[in-house]
Amino acid sequence: MIRALRSAHSMLDRDSGKGPVLQAAPTSPWKRNLVRLAFLAPDIQKIILDGRQPDHLTLALLMKENIPLLWSDQRRKFGIESTD
């Protein structure tokens, strides 16, 4: 899961000064789903990187589920306690 999250971030260009931007559209359905992981709420990404994600929060789940844009909706959907 950590490798997938890092791969998602590596697909983005952060040197544009405008926030994360894709240089080119992902060429496969898997990569299109993968890049969405870079837009998970920062606290969700941190618990993944720390290895503290709930057992149900798997890469397979994240790759098949629609990931809401709002971080609060992501937390609710994936059962993550808010750290706000």
Image: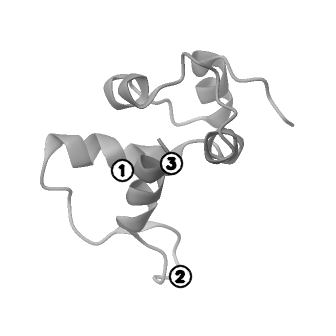
Q: Residue furthest left?
A: 27
Which class describes the residues within 10 Å of circle 2: few (<14), some (14-19), or many (20+)?
A: few
What is the x, y in percent for residue 12? 40, 67
Nearer to us in this view, 55 or 18: 55
| Label 2 close to label 3 by CB (< 8 Å) | no
Left or right: residue 51 compared with residue 13: right
Disc 3 target residue: 2
The residue positioned 61% from the left and 40% from the top of the image is 48
Residue type at mark 3? Answer: Ile
Residue type at mark 2? Answer: Gly
Dot in front, 2 or 3 = 3
Residue type at mark 1? Answer: Val
Disc 1 target residue: 35
Question: Disc 3 to disc 1, how far (Cα)?
Answer: 13 Å
Identify the mark nearer the N-term, 1 or 2: 2
Disc 2 target residue: 17
Q: In the rendered image of this protein, does residue 19 appear above or below residue 43?
A: below
Q: Tell me the element at label 3.
A: helix
